[in-house]
Image (cartoon, rainbow, N blue to C red):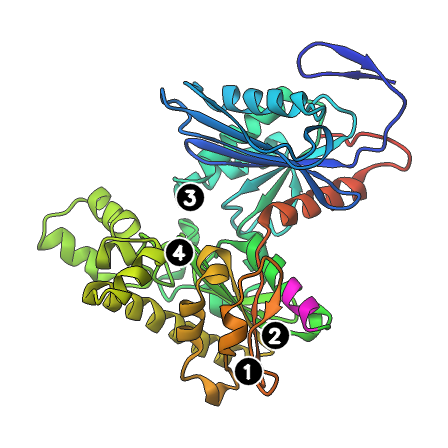
């Protein structure tokens, strides 16, 4: 068959069953990408374009298997003007490895979209109407959805013939009951302005809760898990039988745990106080709570490794920041144990959760009456594999499960396009 390429060339090749998915995570000034082969769920290449629009733009491309043969990362620097140029540069790097985006082996492009509201509870093929709804949600995700939209439009221009699939951070949390999702404010006002708890990091919570069940040798529907996604952004979820019933982030990613630069839970009256007494504008309060709070606000650092180093040197401010971080974490573990009624496992994931043994130890310490304990030897082991760090006698398993949001997006996108593809045909109507 003859396959059009996004650059105006044509190639003739035997019919191929599409089996690759390109995953795009578009930020305001960056694009992360991974190309995966869904036959064995292996990574063919990955990359990051950062500082888009600046003179110091940088692209780092890593071929992992396939044409690049795992030869190591390649880097290019210099101004990359916009997302269109960024994605074209990434496409050139992929083509250099024999993995061009014009390949008939490409089944779909999967996009991380941060906010899907209540309308999108599953991966969705992006149509004009879907894109309009993502745009309508910009007021509740002003830092994220515009960049996601830019990435989608750029990818559509490069491959207009290819299914573009949105996988939403909020989708996994749409199973929360109204009692967990509603704020106790005037219902008409809440409904008019879409004010409710949506939750985020959903692809991570879905992946990790399922992997935790697998680690225990059980089906997801038979396991209750508390997932602690601890990175610069941090969130917790209570997952009952594979369904999210509670999560810590709310209308925005600001609610919940203490994070790298975000305050997490705070008395709403603090905002009024700062406006009335300190004379701060709405934008100034926004910057304070989102970018100058959390760990960086408490001690000047948001890198847990640096905070632990300072603690070991006797730094009292770093120690207090760590204690506040852990205190909030314990509160959520206890609250979610009450919500679930029965807890089979607590799973740590993301940068801090996967790599900081002191955080895991401190978060679980003192919770023995809940059936929780950490084995010091197992906790100290560094590994990229899912593993248990609780002693055999512990009633509740404690696990470390490396998250893989890109694989989760690829899995969901590929499953969707496969379900929509007519038998024996190579493309899905977009």
Magenta-colored span: 211-216
Estimate how packed mark 4 is, as few (under 14), some (14 to 19) or many (20 or more) residues with alpha carbons within 10 Å. Answer: some
Q: Is residue 177 visible?
A: no
Where residue 45 sits in the image (x, y, percent)?
64, 35
Mark 4 or 3 closer to N-term? 3
Q: Does the magenta run of residues contain 306?
A: no
**Which label lies toward us, 4 or 3?**
3
Q: CA distance from mark 1 to mark 2?
A: 9 Å
State which quarter of the image contains the C terminus: top right
* Viewer-side residue, 300 vs 228: 300
Q: Dot 1 lies on which element?
A: loop
Q: Which residue is mark 3?
A: 141
Where residue 235 sits in the image (x, y, percent)?
45, 60
Mark 3 or 2 closer to N-term? 3
**Which label lies toward us, 1 or 2?**
2
- Which residue occupies 61% across, 64% down? 209
Q: Which residue is mark 1?
A: 341
Q: Are marks 1 and 2 in contact (CB under 8 Å)?
A: yes
């Amino acid at each position: 068959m003859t396959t059009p390429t996004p650059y105006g060339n044509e190639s003739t090749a035997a019919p191929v069953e599409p089996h690759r998915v390109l995953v795009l995570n578009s930020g305001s000034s960056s694009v992360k990408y991974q190309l995966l082969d869904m036959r064995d769920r292996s990574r063919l290449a990955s990359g990051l374009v950062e500082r888009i629009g600046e003179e110091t733009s940088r692209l780092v491309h890593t071929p992992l298997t396939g044409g690049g043969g795992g030869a190591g990362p390649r880097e290019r620097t210099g101004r990359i003007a916009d997302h269109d140029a960024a994605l074209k540069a990434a496409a050139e790097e992929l083509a250099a490895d024999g993995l061009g985006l014009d390949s008939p082996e490409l089944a779909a492009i999967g996009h991380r979209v941060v906010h899907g509201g209540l309308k999108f509870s599953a991966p969705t093929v992006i149509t004009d109407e879907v894109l309009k709804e993502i745009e309508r949600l910009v007021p509740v995700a002003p830092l994220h959805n515009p960049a996601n939209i830019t990435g989608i439009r750029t990818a559509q221009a490069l491959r207009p013939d290819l299914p573009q699939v949105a996988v939403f951070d909020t989708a996994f949390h749409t199973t929360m009951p109204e009692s967990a999702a509603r704020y106790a404010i005037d219902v008409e006002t809440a409904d008019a302005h879409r004010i409710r708890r949506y939750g985020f990091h959903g692809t991570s919570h879905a992946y990790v809760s399922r992997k935790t069940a697998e680690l225990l040798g059980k089906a997801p529907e038979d396991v209750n898990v508390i997932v602690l996604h601890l990175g610069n952004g941090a969130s917790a979820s209570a997952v009952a039988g594979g369904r999210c019933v509670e999560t810590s982030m709310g209308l925005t990613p600001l609610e919940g745990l203490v994070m790298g630069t975000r305050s997490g839970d705070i008395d709403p009256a603090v905002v009024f106080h700062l406006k009335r007494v300190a004379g701060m504008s709405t934008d100034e309060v926004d910057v304070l709570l989102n970018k100058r709070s959390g760990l960086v606000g408490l001690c000047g650092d948001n890198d847990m490794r640096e905070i632990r180093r300072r603690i070991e040197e006797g730094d009292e401010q770093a120690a207090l920041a760590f204690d506040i971080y852990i205190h909030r974490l314990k509160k959520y573990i206890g609250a979610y144990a009450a919500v679930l009624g029965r807890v089979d496992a607590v799973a740590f994931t993301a940068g801090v959760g996967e790599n900081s043994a002191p955080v895991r130890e401190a978060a679980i310490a003192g919770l023995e009456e809940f059936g929780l304990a950490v084995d010091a030897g197992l906790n100290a082991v560094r590994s990229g594999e899912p593993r248990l760090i609780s002693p055999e006698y512990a009633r509740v398993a404690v696990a470390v499960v490396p998250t893989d949001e890109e694989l989760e997006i690829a899995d969901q996108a590929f499953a969707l396009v496969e379900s929509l593809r007519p038998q024996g045909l190579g493309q899905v109507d977009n």
